[in-house]
Amino acid sequence: MSFERSSGLLLHITSLPSYGGIGDLGPAAYEFADFLAAGKQRLWQVLPLSPTGYGNSPYAALSAFAGNPLLVSLEKLSDWGWIDRKRIAGLPGRSGNIRFEEVVQKKMPLLVEAARNFLHRRTEPQFAEQWSRFEGYCTINRSWLNDYARYNVLRRKFDSQCWNVWTKAHAYRDADAFAQLEKEQGEDLAIEQVIQFVFDEQWTELRRYCAERDIRFIGDVAIFVNYDSADVWTHRDIFELNEDLSPIRVSGVPPDYFSETGQRWGNPLYRWDVLEQRGFDWWVDRIRRAHSLYDVIRLDHFRGFEAYWSIPAEDDTAVNGEWVKAPGAVLFSKLHEALGELPFIAEDLGLITAEVDALREQFILPGMRILQFGFSNRGAHNYLPHRYEKNTVVYTGTHDNDTTRGWWENGATKVEKAAVNAYVHPGKEGAVWPLIRAASTSVADICLFPVQDILELGSEARMNVPSRSGDNWGWRCAEGVLVPKLAEKLAALTEITDRDRVPEDVRQKAVEQA
């Protein structure tokens, strides 16, 4: 699929300076949308919106379909009459990085209280319309919603332990155990469904607000899912599991220049043969859900759709893995048949072969280029603007990179700094905005900048260090720093690089879809 020439910013929802200690779908999200519009940015990229598990990573989600409850705005629920404003007065404020444990301890009980209030007051006239939409929402999303609610309630019941160590009846999804759960904890199950409904309501409202300002969302779909997730618990037959429910083989990447032992991610692998026999029904449902949330979908670890690194589950490293072919072309053909033309972006970073390029080109998917990667040697020049094609998405950096300023000051080698000096001549200005301009003036259809880069922040604002097991994902944008002068600077660059034009039919279609 081809894209209009445009630019945008990468900022995950949790990084907004929202009231409550974590970014959410409340006022700060609308303030950021207004900043995007003022800067003539037409794209807002977010990370996966799924509920997070261990490590708070959006890429280690408890569900590939559900929304993260922590993104729900209690301020908006107060405006809806679901909870008294005084009840949320003690939440953390809008400043500072996320303290996840504190946020969970303080926010989740209030969210549950608000959902329970809605259930108990649903017959009151002021809630009639919302209740009708909630019933419709449960019907539309029943393919995943009921099982996600069960999973979440059971996970609490078993002290957040992984589903494979629950009682045998619950791990193997016994019908009698489900009936007993419904009898004993029916309201808790309903509360989980209400929270998901609230997430969708608030997300849809924000998306519509953005569409009216010619802003589209780019969302992220990780190729693999977490073992401790509602997805694997519910659909054990499509994953490589032993009879005792443990993984047979897991995901990762092979040893390379950066790691002698590779990376062992640990996600269970798919039984692609089973999925293909079933018409890839789970993937069709997953992408249908993603497309209902986002305008554009970035496919994380795209090379895994051509071949994936398969590691014996009992191994502690990725050394003994092997490449196994995946049916990517058949899958994408089925997705196109079931859902029509899909706005995919291929995250084609890392070890990319001719076969991976061929798969991407077969379905006319834009690939990604990261400017920070382009200056080490001649072999890296594929990441520099003079080597781009139009059907490309360029970033100064992503959530997995250091900020551009942090990279320039702390990470770039002497060779890389010399190359940057030759390419963009940063001078006293520093490297950040010259690299932003290099991306924006390129022929790439889409260019995207992390908010940390337009603010010229250093390594203290880095979102994620992939090799670090903790202390990730917590960065939040400070309140009041996205000022009109900065929006004007972005707008001027966007205008001169012809990334600000929106055809009327495209704008109207985006509003209708939202």
Image: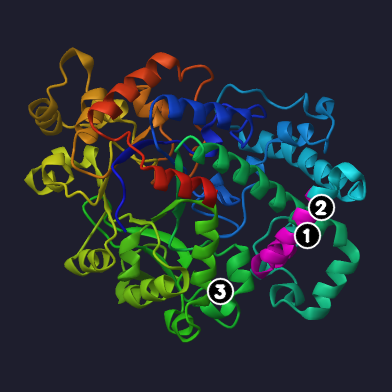
Residue 165 visible from this viewpoint: yes
Q: Which residue is mark 2?
A: 131
Which residue is farthest front?
504
Q: Quadrant of residue 98?
A: top right
Three-letter residue code for mark 1: Glu
Disc marking residue 246 = 3
The picture quadrant where one finds residue 440 is top left
Quadrant of the image occupied by residue 124:
top right
Q: Is residue 77 left or right of residue 436?
A: right
Q: Is residue 140 above or below residue 500?
A: below
Residue at figure coordinates x 30%, y 63% from the top left: 303
Q: Residues within 10 Å of mark 3 (few under 14, many from 20)?
A: some
Give the x, y percent position of residue 276. 44, 82
For the point 60% across and 57% down, the residue is 62
The secondary structure type at the circle numbered 3 is loop
In three-dimensional space, the C-alpha distance between marks 1 and 2, rounded to whole angstroms, equals: 6 Å
In this orientation, which residue lies closer to the viewer: 49 or 342? 342
Which residue type carries mark 2?
A: Trp
Indicate the position of residue 346 as horizontal and vertical percent values. Answer: 32, 57
